[in-house]
Image: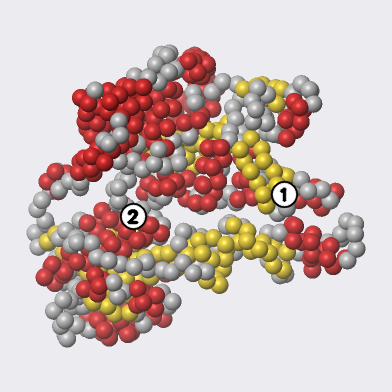
Amino acid sequence: AIDPAVGGVLIRGERGTAKSTAVRGLAALLPEITCATCRYGCDPESENLCGQCAQERAGGQVIVTKRRQVRVVNLPVSATEDRVVGTLDLQAALEHGRREFEAGVLADAHRGILYVDEVNLLDDHLVDTLLDSAAMGVNRVEREGVAHSHPAEFILVGTMNPEEGDLRPQLLDRFGLAAEIRGDADPAARAEIVRRRVDFEASPRQFLRRWGPQTDALRNRIVGARAHLARVEVPAEMLALITHIAIQMAVDGHRADIVMYKTARALAAWEGREQITAADVRQAAEMALPHRRRRDPFTPPHLDEDELERAMKAFEKKGGAQAGEPGDGAKDQATAAADEAPASAADRGEAAGPQPGERHFAAASALETPALFTSERIPVQRRHGGRRTLTESKDRRGRSVRSRLMHEGEPPDLALVDTIRAAATRAGRPGKPTIAPEDYRIKRRTRKIGNLMLFVVDGSGSMAAQRRMALVKSAVLSLLADAYKRRDRVGVITFRKTDATETVPPTASLDLAHARMRDLPTGGRTPLAHGLDLARKVIGRERTKDPEVRPIMILLTDGVANVGIRAGSDPIEDAMRSAQALRRDRVPALVIDADQRRSTATALPQLARQMAATHLRLETLASGHLTQAIRLATA
């Protein structure tokens, strides 16, 4: 609010923690603005003007202005690229033959707040577009025969629930600041939250009048801080501290340094000071670094306050500005990497003893695994998209790459320029063309679809032998790391004792799957058929939700089935029937044999044939020979 150039805010938190309420309440704290009466509400004092305002200024005219409140513009997750950046004005083109620009959400958000709820569920290319516009302050559009640019200066605020999946690190880094919200654990504070909510619902006007003085005081303080910002200086010693912290924390690139610099100035302006202090730098680091600190796919964004304190003390010990001299970086980064080494279970305070009859195994060293799905374009239309495989989209989401004839009964997604061009070609004469149904062209869009990897893991007692479970966990964690890079959804089913359990329902949160796999116990008998039946049920449920989902089942077991579906039934025959059912449902599958004894007693090769699955031994995962087999399994 004090310096929009900081680069926006990402608010992460669990459900029901008032993330959206906080964002919408921010608009009431911002002062009214003076804006032009043009479509974009330009700042008459700025050099960043739309074409109309720039033309008026160049012609010596006075730009007509008005006063209005700062707007909060909501961007729904389902928004298309056309709606976000703008597109060709269909009405002007058809009625008057003029090629005009129809502004989108970025125009509405100029000089306001652009709020994206569940930003982690928004298409990556749209997030890129938003962040680029926020950084440059301009929206440039070149599409459908239209070339247009307009000012787009806004405060970008995104909210997300990490349990529903994360943003790619490249996108996380583009948000200036990040904040973590948790539910309050203090009973008195929770009671006050309830009282205020009930009071607001009973009488919103009375509630606003009651808290009006506090709101006005905050607004006036923000206005004063904005005016004071230009007078805030950054001493050389504080700039050296900023760069020292960035190096010690081993963040990539220079964006963190710049954001800390701007944030520290805004904090000093908020306090009415003309120089930033070490306290300002520390507070800025606490907001600018957590989302830039992810070191591996399964480490949640965090900032170790003790490590930050050590970095600041090391700076003081080195003599202030001298700490920023060249040559310190490699040593500092090595120190930071050592400090960030994973803690042991004892260090984390976790319980050390397994349950009676159960054993716990840590994962073995990481196994080499290839990508499970190729990224080749496939000639299949899908209604919903993901992140991994490029394919044609059947709805209006995705990038428009070409056009084609529209068939009868298809929902219109008109490619206007191509439609008009077809009409003009058919007419064969100059002048305004008459558009007929045979001229209609619709857009062909492409987007990346996601995949569902369903792990079906044997947790029986026989898996404890020869540390099989440790190898299985290592294989799964390696595959999860690949899924994280590709933004696949994953699910985990475990079977042990007398039943199977959906340990991790299909989710985009790889952190959750990793945590559940890490703590997976072993013990009891092997109800293999139960595991296969539950996998079939889960995949069927996901296909009902999304008929275009692309699943693959990965079965990890030693094949020693000894529990049937019913009392007295043959466990092997039951497993074979379950495998045949999966084959009838056309479920791509991979069977990874964890029996290192190469026992001939297991029925896994036959089970794999019944499923039309590829049968592989666990040790082949480390040899790099899995690529071709997986491509066959997912063909």
The image position of residue 504, as x and y in percent, is 31, 58
The residue carrying mark 2 is: 510
Residue 305 in view, yes or no? no
Q: Give me the disc on residue 146.
A: 1
Q: Give me the disc on residue 8.
A: none
- Horizontal arrangement in the rendering, residue 351 relative to residue 124 (left or right): left
Query: In the picture shown, does residue 615 fall above or below 182?
Result: below
Furthest toward the front, the residue is 326
Q: How is the image coloured?
A: secondary structure
Q: Earlier in the sequence, mark 1 or mark 2?
A: 1
Query: In the picture shown, does residue 140 fall above or below 275?
Result: below
Identify the residue at image location x=53%, y=51%.
125
Q: Label 1 vs label 2: CA separation?
A: 41 Å
Task: State the residue in front, 436 or 497.
Answer: 436
Q: Which corner quadrant holds the C terminus? A: bottom left
Identify the residue at image location x=12%, y=61%.
359
The image position of residue 617, as x and y in percent, is 23, 77
Q: Residues within 10 Å of mark 2 (few under 14, many from 20)?
A: many
* Amino acid type indicated by mark 1: Val
Q: Residues within 10 Å of mark 1 (few under 14, many from 20)?
A: some
Residue 66 in view, yes or no? yes
> Exactly how many numbered labels are in the figure?
2
